[in-house]
Image (cartoon, helix red, strand yellow):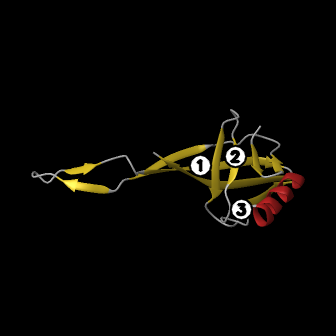
Amino acid sequence: MTRFVKGLVTLQFNQDPQRPAASAVSLHQVLEIDSAGAVYVYGKSSLQRGRYRLTFNRITDEVLADLLAFVETTVAGVRHTFTWYDHADVARTVRLTSPTVEHSNIGPNRHQVEIELTEDVTA
């Protein structure tokens, strides 16, 4: 199951995300240009940033309250990083891209929640 961990605090979700969409952006610094005008790009100090948009369709009231408390107090919105364990139990150090969590009530004790995470990986 998907979970967020920060220090001694663990937030366990009651389901895995519906759409764990991922996208990556590579940022490179140009170091030189050759005589033909082609750019030399070295990956030595490049930064690769992964973005993950997680959509949970049936979050319970209890898990939603825990998530909102985790975002507000434990990671202080976008300020602190935390460890995200995905459905395959792969650990990633991430932070929220927004200080708020998008959620809507879809029925009794059911909420749809969308969370966007950013992972910085130095290549």
The image shows a total of numbered marks equal to 3
Quadrant in which the C terminus is drawn: top left
Q: Is residue 23 left or right of residue 73?
A: left
Q: CA distance from mark 2 to mark 1?
A: 11 Å
Up-down: is 11 above or below 77? above
What's the amino acid at mark 2? Answer: Trp
Give the SS element for disc 2: strand
Q: CA distance from mark 3 to mark 2?
A: 16 Å
Q: Is residue 108 visible?
A: no
Report the residue that reaches farthest toward the top: 88
The residue carrying mark 2 is 84
Q: Quadrant of residue 117?
A: bottom right
The residue carrying mark 1 is 52
- Depth check, mark 2 against mark 1: the one in front is 2
Report the residue that reaches farthest toward the left: 35
Up-down: is 67 above or below 3? below
Specify which label sits upstream in the sequence, 1 or 3: 1
Q: Is residue 46 left or right of residue 105?
A: left
Viewer-proximal residue among 21 and 49:
49
Q: Which residue is rendered at x = 83% and y = 62% of the image?
A: 69
Q: Quadrant of residue 104?
A: bottom right
| Dot 1 alpha-carbon crowd within 10 angstroms: few under 14, some 14 to 19, many 20 or more | some
Q: Which residue is rendered at x = 86% and y = 59% of the image?
A: 65
Q: Which mark is residue 101?
A: 3
Circles 2 and 1: CB distance less than 8 Å? yes
Q: Is residue 94 left or right of residue 68?
A: left
What's the amino acid at mark 3? Answer: Val
Report the residue that reaches farthest toward the front: 44
What's the amino acid at mark 1? Answer: Tyr
Residue 62 horizontal/vertical position (percent)? 89, 54
Give the SS element for disc 3: loop
